[in-house]
Image (cartoon, helix red, strand yellow):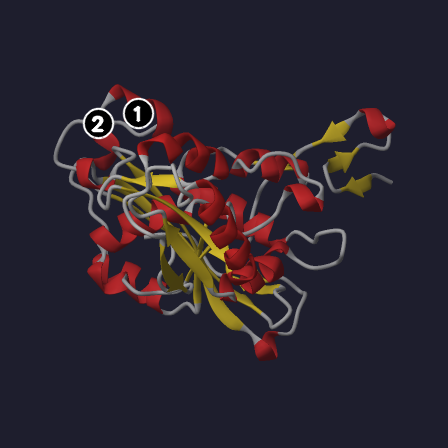
Amino acid sequence: MAKLAAAGRIDAAGGENTRVLHRLDVREGPTGVGNDATSRVGIVVDVETTSTIVDLGAMIELAVRPFRFDRDGVITHIGRVHQWLEDPGTPLSPETTAITGLVDADVAGRCIDDEEAVRLLRSASIVVAHHAAFDRPWVERRLEGARGLDWACSFRQVDWRANGFDGRALGYLLQQTGWFHEGHRAGSDVDALLQLLRHNFPHDRTVLSVLLENAAMPSWIIRAEGAGFAAKDLLKARGYRWDPGRKVWWTEVSDDDRIAEEFWLAGNVYTAGAGARVLGPSYEQVTAAGRFL
């Protein structure tokens, strides 16, 4: 009988030298596990676009798939995939076609059902994407009625390495649980993410359970206002990102890590001789409703 390993399915015939991947097929309906009496609704989301920058492109595909989960983060029921294509009004670039597999004929005359998409998104207590910092701005620009929801990000809010995984790419993570899918289309990617959320870590908690716990914790956006030019390499190495709109380096840290970050900034960015133009950074507390914007 084949064994199930955290890094894939190990074939009995090949022993530990062989891993077998199975094509992913996420079925609609009850999962047969968990406590449906305590369940809430979640939804997984993925988008395909013509650009990586919201203001320079258009959404050409949106997929959402609702599910129910209990208080332990166990998925008890899976809904059907809802998937829409949308005509951006301009020809698709070769780069867009290469990434998404979509061609002009696929999207010609197509449009997202705004009312249905908003209804589904607003029915959920949590919206999950693998790159929420990418997906959320696109969704909220295209669907005004879906703004202000609670979001969670399986890319940033799950410590995959601490749980025995390599990397954080969606397809690679899925393969390490023993499955493969046809990536780079929104419908296929929401299924891949949903399957990952169902996975049990070695400590017998689901990925979804860990994600929900982290998403519920308040955190802080720290902006290194007025940082000297010489500090940019230090900030970048520390994990700060450049916000071109505000023209400031920023990062997000947990409530527990805020004090340590304050000390680091004081000693490296706002110390004498570092060229800072103000006395210190600014802080903004954020929750699931305000993250990834």
Secondary-structure class at tag 1: helix
Give the x, y percent position of residue 155. Answer: 51, 45
Residue contact at pointers 2 and 1, CB within 8 angstroms: yes
Q: Nearer the viewer, residue 170 or 109?
A: 170
Q: Residue at x 51, y 65 (%)?
A: 217
Identify residue type, mark 1. Answer: Thr
Residue 247: give x, y in percent of width and height. 25, 41
Secondary structure found at label 2: loop
Q: Quadrant of residue 43?
A: bottom left
| Quarter occupied by the N terminus | top right
Pinpoint residue 225: horizontal percent, then vertical percent: 31, 48
Q: Is residue 149 visible?
A: yes
Q: Residue at x 72, y 31 (%)?
A: 20
Evaluate whether residue 28 shows in this view.
Answer: no
Instruction: Using the image, determine if residue 3 lies above or below residue 18.
Output: below
Q: Is residue 132 above or below residue 8?
A: below
- The quadrant in which residue 204 appears is bottom right
Q: Amino acid at mark 2?
A: Leu
Of 188 and 126, the residue lying toward us: 126
Mark 1 = which residue? Answer: 97
What numbered label is drawn on residue 92?
Answer: 2
Give how far across and how far down residue 11 sits, in percent.
Answer: 81, 32
Q: Is 53 situated left or right of 261 in this image?
A: left
Q: Which is more N-terminal, label 1 or label 2?
A: 2
Which mark, by number, is residue 21?
none
Is 275 displayed left or right of 189 in the figure?
A: left
